[in-house]
Image: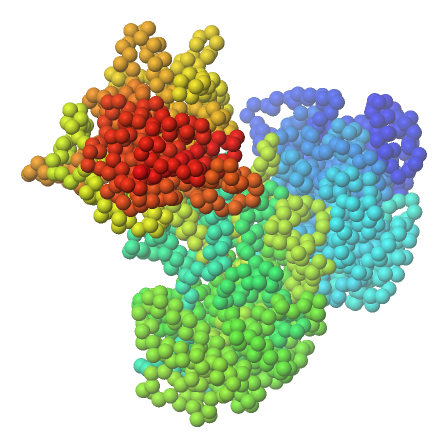
Amino acid sequence: MGNSYAGQLKTTRFEEVLHNSIEASLRSNNLVPRPIFSQLYLEAEQQLSSLEAGSRADNEEEEEEEEEEGSESSSPPVSYQMKPPPEGCCTTDGFCQAGKDLRLVSISNEHIEVPSGFLLVGAKSPNLPDHLLVCAVDKRFLPDDNGRNALLGFSGNCVGCGKKGFCYFTEFSNHINLKLTTQPKKQKHLKYYLVRNAQGALTKGSVICWKGAEFRGRQPSSSTCSSTLFQLPESSGLSGSTSSEPLPAANPSAPTGTQQAAAAIDHIPSTAAFSSTVYNGRESPKQQLVKNNLSALTRPSVLGTLTNSGPPKKRHKGWSPESPSSTETWNLQPNSQAPNRIKNDGGSLSSLPHSALVGPASSPMLGSGEPVSVPDNLLKICKAKPVIFKGHGNFPYLCGNINDVIVSPLLYTCYRNSQSLSRAYEQYGASTIQPISEEMQLLLTVYYLVQLASDQVPLIEDLEQIFMRSWRESHLSEIRQYQQAIPQTFPQVPSQITPVTSAQLPWLAGLAASSCNDSVHIIECSYSLAEGLSEMFKLLIEGKLIKTNYVVIICASRNRAIDSCIVITGKYQARVLSESMLSPSDYQKEVNYQLVTGKVETLGSFFSTLCPEGDIDLLLEKFYQENQGHISSSLSASVNKPTALNGTGATLCTSYEIERHQIRPFQLAVAQKLLSHICSIADSSTQNLDLGSFEKIDFLICVPPSEVTYQQTLFHLWHSGILLELGLEKEHLTKQRVEQYVMKLDAEAQIKFKVFLQNSMQNPHTLFVLIHDHAHWDLMSAMHSLYPQTELSTGLVDRLLNCREVKEAPNIVTLHVTSFPYALQTQHTHISPYNEIHWPSSYSNGVDLYYENKKYFGLSEFIESTLSGHSIPLLRYDSSFEAMVMALGKRFPRLHSAVIRTFVLIQHYSAAMMAVCGLSQMKNYTSVETLEITQNLINSSRQCPSGHGLMVVLRIPCTPLAAVAYERLYNVRERLALEDNFEIILGNPNSGITIGKHFVEQLKVWQKIEDVDWRPQTYLELEGLPCILIFSGMDPQGESLPRSLRYCDLRLINSSSLVRTTLEQELGLAAYFVSSEIHTEKAVVNDVLESDPEKLSSTDNEDEEIATEGSTSEKRSPMKRERSHSHDSASSSLSSKASITAFCSESSPPLIGAVDMAKSPHHVLNNSAEETTNNYERQKQKVDKGAQTTISKHLPLLTEQLDTKQNIKSAQISITSSSSSPFSSSSSSSAPTHSSFILQTSQCSMTKASKQPPIVFLPKLVYDIITSTDSSGLPKSSSLLPYHSVMWASSFRPLMSKMMTCTEQSLYYRQWTVPKPIHMDYNNRNEGRMDTFHPRRLLLSGPPQIGKTGAYLQFLSILSRMLIRLTEVDVYDEEEININIKEESDQYCHQPGDLWPDLETFKKMPFDYTIHDPKYEDASLICSKLQTINSEGSSMSRREEDMYTRRQTTRMRLSKYAAYNTYHHCEQCHQYMGFNPRYQLYESTLHAFAFSYSMLGEEIQLHFIIPKSKEHHFVFSQPGRQLESMRLPLVTDKSEDYIKSPTFTPTTGRHEHGLFNLYHAMDGASHLHVLVVKEYEMAIYKKYWPNHIMLVLPSIFNSAGVGAAHFLIKELSYHNLELERNRQEELGIKPQDIWPFIVISDDSCVMWNAVEVDCSGDRKSDYTWTERNVSLKQILQHIEATPNVTHYALIGMRKWSSKTNSAEIKEPFSCCHVHDFIMLNVDLTQNVQYNQNRFTCDDVDFNLRVHSAGLLICRFNHFSVMKKQIAVGGQRSFHIKSKVSDTPVSISPAQYICAPDSKHTFLAAPAQLLLEKYLQYHSHRFFPLSLKNYSHPVLSVDCYLNLGPQIAVCYVSSRPHSLNISSSGLTFSGLLLYLCDSFVVASFLKKFHFLKGATLCVICQDRNSLRQTVVRLELEDEWQFRLRDEFQTANAKEDRPLFFLTGRHI
């Protein structure tokens, strides 16, 4: 059982071995493949030493491994049936049957009796992968160190219940509840020896070496070994989780490929020296260790294990040669191709920092070979814990004092990753390119380490880029076609890389290291790394590595691959790297532990020994006693004085202002971009957002759980006025109401969020915007909470914002807002790249895109200031501080550097305060930088008459340390009696701001606040307060700082956590808006700066210079910039001056001395002039806004300032005379004089601070990363890992480019980063879906503090306005015209309250010929005898220009009964529209319908497109399904839910905008609606309206006007009426009972109104009326119910107008013209036709024909129709252009006609349209006598043509028995004969009288009929014709022009 025997035949099948051999040879370095038969028989084992040897495991063992894993196999494992346990015994996993706990974690500290000869071992239970079960086993049955000599069988005891004597492992496994499904074998389940550690606790030891597993040599053919790191959730095997495409010819030591997330497969090169058995593709015992002990991996004390490698024997195991593997759980890098999820047993494995060249804190890795003993007292001797990075190959055991070393696998992971080719190359077929060799990797690593400076720390990103570049250069020709060349990053790497052999490697590495002054030491070993490590420890103990920072240990021999590791021995580097392995929570815990246990006291006592005068506290106490009473009065005098302000305000500082809510151009632009994205989501065909269905906006803003951020957001929300604007709140807004709209993501968030969700469900017509501000803050997956005990809010964002309700709610839009969007831009992001909105650039090609009066200073501007040529860098580091920290770090190696740094900085601040207060000896105990900060802080309030001062932010991330710092600084301030001079504020994210009463009173005075209980709640409200703000919390959470911020001290930020978001977030605190310079002043200031080099290096002028320099820096040529040598103030010329002038820089009240005044007068005056102007602008804004009434007392000052502004130019040239001294203004003067004002404003420190960005102090390490650039010109920080919960998809990625826009950066991260399992987006993968993006999720990103809050609040405002606009419509709102021409009669025929007309009464009503519709304002007046008297005066007064003015509209809110266009989508009408995604697009059928019409002289063939859903409206013939007729109801039918009249809507050019959705207008009633379209528009209309019936006009009508559509609608309807009468007559129904009405509606009718009349007054004539919106259904049903309705030929309604008066509706029914929306009786009007040729006024023409035929036209005055203004389609779609050229040339109406046979340009337009347009504009040429001659109209026979508003017409019909006006008293000024038919005869015309000289116009189809008409009508008897009076429309002959002849009456 425990041994293997030589010569034994393997049980492996021949085919399998053959397959394996072929596969191995394909991947082997060796040219000769291994003989198959030599594999079939085991070779005799040779006793080799532990360093050289190896033999393979027999197959029996391999199959055991397979069975254990239960993976997919060609043959299923033999099932094993366990014996049922005895009744009543315990069956819990991890306990024995006696119920005793056996788990190692539970009993590790208990005393366990172990009999002699027995050992404690750890057994693995398949049901408890995270635990080991403790067992006592007789060591005779366990193998020796070589894996041999184990006795067959088993003997063991239970350590739980003490039961002894188990002789069979099967029996024992039952007792300890292993619950196996396979045959129990000790080799499979007894895995580890258990040993006691230094504390006596039982811990996992080495792996039990069954069959020499730990001492096998590598086989040449081996390339990789698959080791499953995590069990998959679905099954225990790999089950298809990995890619199995083989790599054709890759180097076996370098598999390319996809890293598997589901099975993190470790790859180790074949030539590496391993002593491990090949386990047929399954896990080796040590890999099982990783599996069993995952939970332990996160503990700082445990190190990861080494993996063994070997080739798999079966491909079906899920192994692929390109699958790299990893047991380093903290460095998993899954690629997006991996389909399965990692089961993250450890919970927080992937959360650990990945950015520096480090891994998590861990104890020695298990290795192989002889153990290496770590010396005792290593930490004590070396003053640092060495960090060992496992490199290539095998790693030895470490034993002994293992707590003093740290082992990390990160370098190994980097090596492995750099050997995997990225998918980007694979897809181009580049996978045949050999990866970089191991030797070259190691050599490049040495090159890299050699060029690192002594204060630099290695970065993994640097190494990855080196490998990338090296690989690219060696394969440049193959790659060039795949990817643009990456520029050189590291010049140290040789450009042409030749292959390096393992023999050359140590020599080359030594050569490289020889030039670095021993900072890199190379150790070469012969046999194993163990000897190299031992030597390294020896050298460390002997102190021979003091100068050495890195030790590279290489073990290379010819017959195997290299082993290597790198040891970081530099104290600084080792400290930084080891500390960066701590997670944020571990970091906090460690610091807390050191504070609580008092370890820091040694540091305090050390500090006290530094001061020669003794302890600082004693000095302070002594100082306090000596100066009590004296110092406080002198110091606080200047502070206390300003609080008692004098009445005149002369000495007040006027520069104070807290910025209220103002929208800047940028914010408006961003808000509009957000709005356009929302609109594009709504407009997309996916219908994910139906904007048309929302009536209003609601919102919720989610902010991090910082009290200050919360209050700050409330503050912005309150002052924005958005709640009132959106109508969410009423006028009297309370703070409690505002709080409903902002949610802190803390423990109480869920309650508020639940209310939000309920509101969204209850209000489907409200659009809810969920704004996630500071969106990068908590991206933890709800399933993987990193700190479950400490952070209650962790994972809240995922739980709330990603919940199913939010994702599925159609009325919730989520907007993520952040300055650092990188973590939301991974391969698994929810946000579409099209839904990202980036803050726009301020300038493009040197041009300002938006004018802003402030300049933004962000990260790039801060970096810019460090370049040479700038006056003073804004980013600095403090070298004396760094030096002291480094020295103390060596002295106190066990203290965390955060503790040391904090204590040193507190010490510096304390000493600086003491120095400023007079203890000058303390200057030596602080740094120049800290002294400058402290002094400017203390002196700032003295320099301003109002006591305004500066803010200093001291950033201390660790909360306990912040509390210590606060307590210490507070105490020092009290002792120095500075408590009234400046405040110290502890800014804790979880609590509000606490400041002293004295300072609260000051702020209240400055801000003019009278509320007694007021306290500042945001940092913005601390504007002008001199203070040190200790800003704590691991991350800033969106807090904004005031404009009085002067110094941002970031020296204590955690510099080991090198993640892009973290660094940029810290620097974002200092982001700042600076008042822009006035353009006229810029040149002068720049002159001073450049001409006065001495000023540049002095601190005195620092405040005046920086802002200007920054603003002009963009204009400099980038080629000329150089990095300045040092921005460390201690070594620069700046600081030497700074130290000399440290105590006079800002302390003396006169800011500018006389000498300076003389030196640069321009400079002084410019600054003050600018300040003056800015103040004036500010005050002006305040006054304009009317925000504060108190401004009025400053009005005299404003006028003075105005004068000042005008005098700037003169002031720049001549300095004002010295007679006006700085403070000479008397108390009675209302404003200071010009020069005193200048000086007074210049003195306020806060004013200066607001004009320049703050100065930022950084740790040296961070400073170097921020200010150094890579080859692309980007700061190095940009190439860091973007966020701690994401990782690179591949180390094999291109560099980012400086030219990348924000969008391109986003796409870069989306391609190259993947979320870790702890990230909330981890599960968002493609699962058979095309798209993982959420359709209603947007991301707004912009630099910190730039105004994103204002932008999204503005977005809410304009979104709300747009929604209101969407629910509104522009309708025509015009008064009826020609009202005064109406018959004025008091005898009304009906009562105001009558619902229907009385037929007999109505017949007596006269017809009103006059047109009252305002759209015909420019049409000819129709005269009747009644109106001739009145018409003259009114029409004469119409001005010509009025005709062409734009028609009046008004904006109306759409009611629920409106008609809609295609943009409206709602749940109710989805089915009606045919767009419901649940249904297929509605099928339609095309039906031909023919009828003959004699007037056209041919048969008309129409086509119906009828959707399946509408076929019930039609009758089809049974056998052939031919369309027979359209069903018509009966006159007697009555139904509430049915409209009897079919509705026809003729339309052209309005497929999108036509209002054809009548679902809501009809209130859901069943109705028949037919769209009448032209043939060429059929397809587009069918696309937009798939569920509507279409009537397609014949192609001959493609260029016809609306008259043709009306004509065909009417003729078709009459023909259909006949068909229906015939059909239903057979059913016994009388013909007159068939409903004869149709509705003809315009495509712009949007709403309908009804007037309700109340006649309940005392007298009959008294009535009141109201108008309201009603449904079309109600109106149509009302009209259809009219008594005797079939006796009316035309029924219509009023055009709506807001100016309708009582007189218009007093008569409920009129007999007059009807337009736009009519009910037409096709039966009565059978013989009256529409003119099919007409384009305009065809309804007026038809109305006149109907009336003259003696038929009734009734207008319901109580109903009105609203017509929407639609800018496209309709009549506008006819464009008259030249037929000759395509170029659009405007053609005037005068050119529409020409003389026949002339060479006039022909026009491409219908002849009828040209005629109508010509007559409308130029008819006065034909009828000169008629112009404005309203009493002598033109006689128009059988037609009405518009001759323009200045000519009146009189209509007569030539039909016999027709009704015409009496013309006996009328004399006409002209005669118009248009296409006369046979009814017009000569005798008819002779009845009428004409003026002498009256003109005649005869219009015919051709010249022949023109002459025939003249002859037939005997026109030459009375009319004189000339040849030149013949004209034609400007059409070519083929377009059939119309001809006219004009003549004069004789």
Residue 1127, image x, y percentages: 66, 73
The residue drawn where x is 38% and y is 36% is 1921
Name the residue nearer the viewer: 1623 or 1355: 1623
Q: Is residue 1150 left or right of residue 78?
A: left
Q: Indicate the quadrant where residue 1386 lies.
A: top left
Residue 172, image x, y percentages: 68, 29
**With respect to residue 1585, does 672 lie above or below?**
below
Q: Is residue 1885 visible?
A: yes
The residue drawn where x is 86% and y is 53% is 497
Q: Is residue 51 left or right of residue 1483?
A: right
Q: Is residue 804 visible?
A: no
How has the structure been colored for display?
rainbow
> Considering the image in quadrants, where does the C terminus appear?
top left
Q: Is residue 1531 left or right of residue 1110?
A: left
**With respect to residue 1844, does 723 lie above or below?**
below
The residue drawn where x is 53% and y is 79% is 935
**With respect to residue 1843, does 176 lie above or below?**
above
Name the residue nearer the viewer: 1297 or 947: 1297
Residue most toward the left?
A: 1658
Residue 571, image x, y percentages: 72, 64
Q: Is residue 564 left or right of residue 632?
A: right
> Considering the image in quadrants, where does the N terminus appear?
top right
Residue 862, image x, y percentages: 60, 67
**With respect to residue 1348, does 1492 lie above or below?**
above
The residue drawn where x is 82% and y is 35% is 248
